[in-house]
């Protein structure tokens, strides 16, 4: 199985590290190459994913990677159902016409091409599923899996910490040189100033997706510090930086995800018993109070920021719930097969769904939603089995990765977290890690 120098065949550990780094690079800088027609943005992680798949196939005979898994099958069914429904819609249904939105520069934010863009979104979802299955197979290997997980997770943890530091530095620069009016900052913090509030172009944007990403990174680093004493102070520092960055994105989804992630972590660290649950709830209440105090302090000292924040909150909350209600009603009219990817856009006036589960339901119906729910429930069941058997004590990354994955799952209910490759990377790492650790506990059987 091993090569002569003891390295992973084909240096797949290096390929995986490059893939993880490219995923993080693709997020905050929005690095992409737009293909002809403007419908497809090729991001750095996508060609690296293709190269990693080729490397795995070339080493398959020697290593015998294990990719077959009930979770993998469910994810494939979800992606396949949405893709098939989108293809049928492309050739059998007319293109819907609805209000065309424009962003703050006057450029069209959505041009109504829901059928073509739906096909592109379906293919992107398929790429995410391939990413999760590939990473799960590499992490599951009994010989190389632990090394794969360790290197991939370290790259992920520190690259997310660097991203959070960049955001905080840009935010500090914006306040120092442009004052407290978020609409004039060179960066856009979408939780404070969305496009129609801005008076100048933004060189970078940070919103709910980045907020949830920082929250997941904070929980990942914090749980890692709890599980291992190696570099604990430095890791705790990375967790604190990312928690602060998640808070200052002013994203409600990020705040909720961070609070729930910390609560779940406290429960499992203290033991699943009423006392630990009560402590976790108390911590959540305390953090909520501190957040309220922070908002009150900002309002008293910098009313421009707080007024913009509450203006954004007020304008988006009602609209989002109204969008979800219309999507739910549409799903109930076609519950089995749905309407195809991006078909919900006329219901939201072109805005994103901000709820991945409703989006899947509308896109592929129960045929896509049920296997997706089962896949996530299965991962939770595997983690619970590992926790009850104390198997997570044999793998320092098992709980940190799972808790970071939980943070992302929370985010999928209120923003576009599921359309981040980090979400699917954490899903694959969680699944592979759990399968490998549980196989050691249960033995050859």
Image: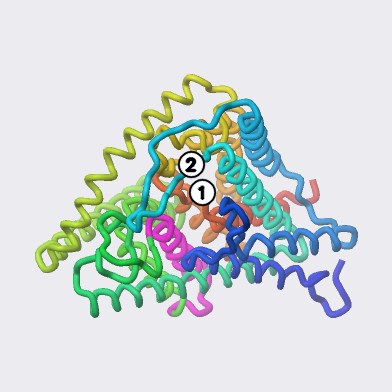
Could you tell me residue 207's position as x and y percent?
A: 37, 58
* Residue at screen point 20% across, 52% down: 310
Q: Are marks 2 and 1 in contact (CB under 8 Å)?
A: yes
Identify the magenta region. Answer: 207-233
Residue count near mark 2 (Cα–Cα under 10 Å), binned few <14, some 14–19, many ≥20:
many
**Chosen colour scheme:** rainbow
Determine the main secondary structure of the stretch shown in magenta.
helix
**Quarter of the C terminus within the rendering:** top right
**SS under mark 2:** helix
* Residue at screen point 50% across, 64% down: 30
**Quarter of the N terminus within the rendering:** bottom right
Asked if residue 230 is among those painted magenta in the image, a careful observer would answer yes
Lateral position of residue 117 relative to residue 440, left or right? left
Nearest the camera: 94 or 262?
94
Image quadrant in which you'd find residue 81: top right
In this rendering, is residue 106 above or below 294?
Answer: above
In this rendering, is residue 233 above or below 53?
Answer: below
Could you tell me residue 408's position as x and y percent?
A: 47, 52
Which residue is tagged 2?
A: 356
Image quadrant in which you'd find residue 89: top right
Mark found first going from the N terminus, 2 or 1:
2
Nearest the camera: 43 or 117?
117
**SS under mark 1:** helix
- In 3D space, how far apart are the residues under numbered discs 2 and 1 (Cα atoms)? 6 Å
Visible in this render: residue 437? Answer: no
Asked if residue 307 is among those painted magenta in the image, a careful observer would answer no
**Residue that lies at the very extreme toward the top in this rendered image:** 333
Which residue is tagged 1?
A: 418
């Amino acid at each position: 199985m091993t090569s002569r120098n003891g390295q992973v065949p084909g240096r797949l550990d290096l390929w995986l590290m490059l893939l993880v780094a490219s995923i993080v690079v693709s997020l905050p800088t929005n690095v992409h190459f737009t293909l002809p027609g403007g419908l497809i943005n090729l991001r750095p992680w996508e060609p690296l994913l293709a190269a990693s798949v080729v490397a795995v196939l070339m080493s398959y005979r020697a290593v015998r990677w294990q990719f077959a898994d009930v979770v993998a099958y469910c994810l494939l069914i979800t992606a396949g159902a949405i893709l098939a429904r989108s293809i049928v819609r492309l050739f059998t249904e007319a293109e819907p016409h609805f209000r065309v939105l424009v962003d703050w520069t006057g450029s069209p934010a959505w041009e109504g091409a829901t059928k073509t863009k739906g096909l592109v979104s379906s293919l992107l979802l398929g790429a995410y599923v391939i990413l999760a299955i590939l990473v799960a197979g590499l992490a599951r290997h009994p010989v190389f899996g632990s090394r794969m997980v360790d290197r991939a997770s370290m790259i992920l943890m520190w690259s997310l910490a660097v991203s959070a530091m960049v955001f905080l530095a840009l935010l500090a620069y914006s306040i120092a040189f442009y004052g407290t009016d978020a609409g004039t900052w060179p960066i856009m913090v979408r939780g404070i100033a969305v496009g129609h509030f801005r008076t100048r172009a933004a060189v970078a944007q940070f919103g709910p997706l980045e907020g949830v990403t920082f929250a997941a990174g904070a929980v990942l680093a914090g749980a890692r510090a709890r599980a291992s004493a190696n570099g604990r102070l430095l890791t705790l520092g990375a967790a604190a930086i990312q928690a602060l960055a998640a808070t200052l994105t002013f994203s409600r989804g990020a705040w909720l995800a961070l609070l729930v992630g910390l609560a779940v972590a406290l429960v499992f660290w203290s033991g699943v018993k009423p006392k630990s649950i009560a402590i976790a709830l108390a911590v959540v209440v305390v953090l909520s109070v501190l957040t309220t105090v922070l908002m009150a302090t900002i309002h008293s000292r910098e009313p421009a920021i707080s007024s913009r924040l509450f203006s954004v909150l007020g304008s988006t909350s009602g609209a989002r719930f109204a969008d979800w209600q219309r999507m739910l009603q549409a799903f109930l009219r076609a519950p089995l097969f749905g309407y195809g990817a991006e078909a919900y856009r006329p219901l939201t006036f072109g805005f994103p769904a901000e709820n991945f589960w409703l989006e899947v339901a509308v896109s592929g119906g129960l045929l896509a939603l049920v296997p997706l729910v089962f896949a996530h429930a299965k991962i939770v069941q595997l983690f619970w089995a590992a926790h009850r058997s104390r198997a997570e004590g044999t793998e320092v990354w098992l709980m940190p990765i799972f808790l970071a994955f939980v943070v992302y799952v929370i985010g999928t209910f209120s923003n576009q977290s599921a359309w981040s490759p980090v979400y699917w990377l954490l899903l694959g790492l969680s699944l592979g890690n759990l399968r490998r650790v549980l196989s050691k506990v249960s033995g050859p059987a």
